[in-house]
Amino acid sequence: MEGRVIGPGPYRATKLWNETIQLFRGGMPSRRHRVHFRYYDRSFSGSEATEYLHQLLLHNCNFGPEVTRCQTLQLLKKFLKAHVIEDVKGRYGTEDFEDNNHLYRFPTQSPLKSYPSRSVSRNSTDLPRLIRWDDYEEFPQQENTAPAKSTGITSDFWNKRHSVAIGDLHECKIIRRKDITTKQVDNIWKSMTASYLQRVLGLTTLDGVLNPEHVKGKFIVHNVFNVNKSGVVVLENPADDMPYWVVSAMKCLAKWPHGNDAKQPVYPGFERDVLKTVADYYQRLKEPLLTFHLYEVFVNILSLLLEQDLASEALQVSTLLLPPPNRRHLHLLLRLMARVSQNPHMPPLNDTIANRTLMVQMFSQCVLGSLDEMDLDELLASKLVTFMMEHHNTIFQVPNKLRCQVEEQLSHLRRVQIKYAGSDTDSSTSPVFYKLITSKVESEEPKVIGTQTPLQQLLEGLISDKELPAKDKRKRLKQFAKSYPEVYRNRFPSEESKASVIPDKNPRLKPHLMFFNFKKPPNPFQRSWSFRA
């Protein structure tokens, strides 16, 4: 039975638990068994249950071929404790599951778990508001300056400077955004990273998956910019790093057999003792490296593992949310696990299982785990850690698209703006225009916190400006469509929608003017025309 991939959602662990039980109950063969001259109908032995469930998990796309028989046995023990199964005498809970001929059966009542109540999001203010053009300051007026040097721009001054007749232009002022603070930069990274993660996971909301209070903008910025040439996070406080002896042990294993920098005497089993030193450190951590707060986020990524590129992108974004020490320690651990697993010179580190399987079993619960100790934690952790180990070179890269989006937002906020006299700067439809438009965006930004993006605000400002001449409006809209085609097409998906708001370029002329060819006047106070034969 392959099962179905459970889609992302805030209660995925419970859904996965219930579906596993349903598959097990629906497919586990049961028959009449005789024990001590007594017959038990619809029963099965412990070894039969272990073998069947192991095969079920191996061929289930939610778990995969990494599941061991030992892990299957641990899950059956949880089934017995949770009364998913019971022995033929009706005992469960305190009994220990036996992988032998001991007989078990399914109870009559439903063993499925009820789904936890959905947490209600307070409001959209949990995520910081992106700073906008509304947050501006005017260029300060210099005292005792001549009127000609005023920051106010009149139509006469504009005409003389450009020698182009553009008609009357209302007085306007050059304004600019206030200097963007470090806190504002952190908030922009926080909001846009959360929005990017929601889109990659395919969710309509992050409610129940990620609490905005647990998203720290300063962590994201640190993880993006404070890295060494290998892409590993560099910590500001050395006290947050691993002890020197742990780092030395990890280097010894990663470079085996040439990593014994301390020139310690090598004896049979030396590499196993070094591995135990590393394992003891990670297994004593107070919480998993992916943290309890982000458990639901990474569990949701499990459903994407069949799509390698999408899963890698989701992990790239999610690991940016980690505290910098956690991200560094996780990066170093996964790199060590991969090198040990792939090193042909590394002797067996266990007498019964391969080095690769040992790495996953030894460290998976140090990486992922829930505060409530969910019943499938071990299996889910093994599945995710295996993928992360195999793609550790990719998942710690910063998504290029996210970086470009944030840089575009910050660049936009630093540009100079023109404000017309009498316009309402607090309105999202203020007639504002860029002084500098240098780059195009690939696609329209999604709504981040329930407000329009700056490009949408600019377009709506152009459309709603009633004081702007029709010709100039068409010209600026044409320039906007050329620079930002995706935003323009989303606003005007059809010619009919465009015609309803944009003035007609060729209005019907009056009969007595049909044979006159108007030329552009040299200035707004003169007209000239020529008669056409």
Image (tube, grey):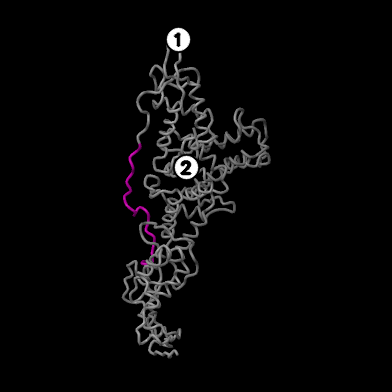
Residue 239 seen by the camera: no
Q: Is residue 114 left or right of residue 238?
A: left
Question: Is residue 57 visible to the viewer in this orientation of the structure?
Answer: yes
Which residue is label 1 attached to? 36
Q: CA distance from mark 1 to mark 2?
A: 47 Å
Q: Is residue 282 above or below residue 221?
A: above
Tell me the residue at 68%/37% (across/down): 345
Residue 184 numbered mark, or none: none
* Label 2: which secondary element: helix
Dominant secondary-structure state across the stretch colored magenta: loop
User: Tag 2: Cα neighbours inside 10 Å, few (<14), some, or many (≥20)?
Assistant: many
9 relative to 239 in the view: left or right: left
272 versus 480 height, above or below: above
Kind of residue indicated by mark 2: Ser
How many numbered callouts?
A: 2
Residue 440 position within the rendered picture, expressed as x and y whole percent measured from the top left = 49, 66
Where residue 363 sits: x, y (%)? 53, 37
* Circle 1 Cα neighbour tier, 10 Å, few/some/many (<14 / 14–19 / ≥20): few
Give the amino acid type for the residue marked by disc 1 in the picture: His
Quadrant housing residue 287: top left
Q: Which residue is mark 2?
A: 303
The quadrant in which the C terminus is found is bottom left
Magenta part of the chain: 115-135
x, y percent for residue 385: 52, 40
Q: Is residue 384 magenta?
A: no
